[in-house]
Image (cartoon, grey):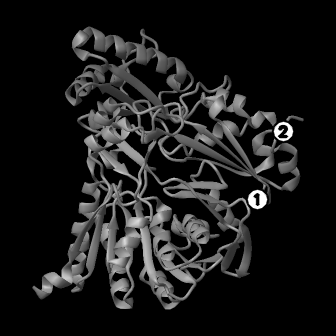
Amino acid sequence: MKLPIKVLVPTGSLGAGTTEEEVRYGISHGAHVIATDAGSTDSGAAYLSTGTSKNNRGSVKRDLGILMKAGAEAGIPLIVGTCGQAGGDLNVDWTKEIVLEVAAELGIHPRIALLYSEQGKAVLKAKNAQGKILPLAPLGALDDRTIDDCDHIVAVMGPEPYMEALKGGADIILGGRTTDTAVLASFALLHGASTAASWHAAKIAECGAQCTTTRLGGSGVLISIGEDHFEVEPLAQNNTCSVESVSAHMLYENSDPFMLTEPGGVLNVTGARYVQADPRTVKVTGSAWEPMPYTMKLEGSSSGRFQTIMLVGIQDPLIMGRVDEFHDRLLAALYERTRKTIGAAAGDFHISLRMYGWNAVSGDKPPPGTPAPREIGVLFVATAETQAMATQIAKACNPYFFHYPLDLDRELPSYGFAFTPADIERGPVYEFKLNHVVRVDDPLELVRTQWLDLGVEVAA
Amino acid sequence: MKVTVKDVCRHVRSKNAGPFWVTIDLFFDGEENFRKYADSEALGPATLSRLFDADPTLVKRFKVPGLNIVKLSYARTSPQGGMVERDMHCGQQYVRLLAVEL
């Protein structure tokens, strides 16, 4: 294929909101492929544990409708990575169902590749026993119990499964968990663009218009990757990319601004040069790619103890002047109340109070002399072994949380509940348990590819 | 006069970098202050340990001279979304750094 390879990145995350106008611009400027990711670990472990999407179904369907229609009309592939936020098998299948629905509505019959990278526990224990699973800081060596604790575990794919699916003639690829960069780089890597520039361009474009000067002024970007460079421009015509907006994106959500570790190597941008090619476009040269032994990062999530929450609003002027004292006394009273009324049956429980409007975000005591707030919201969080017990604790604490006075000789105050019932069952505490990589001999070893050929089904 | 982070930076931001790391970007207001303060001891492991309880041996500091940016990264001390979570995406953590004297 003639270089440069042009990759239309319609949005930072499928469902965030692409527009027909932006996609039309990218297609009319010669896009060879549409590629986007649909998730990340950013929003926490719940989405992997539950196999659900963060973005709502309607938004994802709307974006897929625009992209599938544009891809089918232009005759170019559509690649979606990290489907359904977490990229577990359930998340991929959720996305697949929406794609099938949209295809039927559009009357199109794409050949669809599904890339699954969820891992069985026995496979991982065997790899661990062979010494092929290595920890990343700050975690230590992996033990089998941690593997067992996980609800779902995914291996983060590189570009190779996507390249194979493209070779196999996929019109649409729906991938499980994948590095954002691999999703966007795969087509260019397959078709002979510079390896380093493909990876670097993909990193810059991973959040869509985040690398432009007006981040809310559009949704996506077009990257053009050549033999030794790449260019990036916004899809929205009134938006621009600047040297600063592009180069600063290497820092975003990245603990190292110069090196980015990928499954088969490291992108090194220490020597990258960014120049303004035209008023909207930045050209980048000098990126480097250092091949390394192939590893896939593992992400595993667990669901632990359960929480029940309550919220009150307080404006009482006496309390506004003594928030820290009120916090400490109320918390002690709630612990005592739980011990007295539920006793040993409460098990290993935990209560915390977050004083919104005062110090809820940090939990630190503000320095003396800090002005009193006008009002605060107090969030009560009970954590216990079961949902039922967390709720029992909240119910036991309810009268105190509602009426606890700062001075015991005052008439009992009543604080501002916003809801009835006052207690809200929040579900389990989800956490990521793995920060490890697994060494593989073949990038496809831990990946399962399934094909859904809607054209063949129609013919049959 | 004591100079603080907020006096010499036009923008400071913090964000999670994966579930186990936090990264803070300090955009200095120009080359002069970047040169003067980029290597300041006050932006080192001891300060991050004091402010965030970060393991000082895991603190990373990078300078990006072309952009007059200093990046500080440290390992989270409590799991993202865990029982005592107060800032899932760590987007508010930078605030504690603003008043640090350089």
Relative to the observer, which residue lies in front, A174 or A394? A174
Image check: A135 left or right of A248? left
Residue at the (49%, 85%) spot, across then down: A31
The tally of labels here is 2
Q: In the rendered view, would you say A63 is above or below A51?
A: below
Query: Would residue B40 appear left or right of A312 to someone viewing this image?
Result: right
Task: Identify the secondary structure beneath mark 2.
Answer: loop
Q: Residue furthest left?
A: A460
Viewer-proximal residue among A19 and A169: A169
**Amino acid, disc 2:** Val
Q: Reading the chain from its start, which is encountered first: label 1 or label 2? A: 2
A38 shown above or below B44: below
Q: On the image, which quarter does residue A142 sit in?
A: top left
Whether residue A42 is visible here, answered yes or no, is: yes
Q: Choose mark 1 or mark 2, whichever is in front.
A: 1
Mark 1 — residue?
B67
Examine the rendered structure and indicate whether residue A425 appears above or below residue A100.
Answer: above
Measured Cα–Cα span from mark 1 to mark 2: 21 Å
What residue do we see at 36% from left, 29% from top? A381
Residue assigned mark 2: B3
Q: Residue at x 66, y 26 (%)?
A: B50
* Secondary structure type for disc 1: helix
Return the x and y of residue B75 as percentages of the image width and height: 57, 36
Chain letter of disc 2?
A: B
Quadrant in which residue A2 is drawn = bottom right
Looking at the rendered image, the quarter that the C terminus of chain A falls into is bottom left
Q: State the image coordinates of residue A138 (x, y, percent, origin top left).
A: 53, 34
Q: Are marks 1 and 2 on the same chain?
A: yes
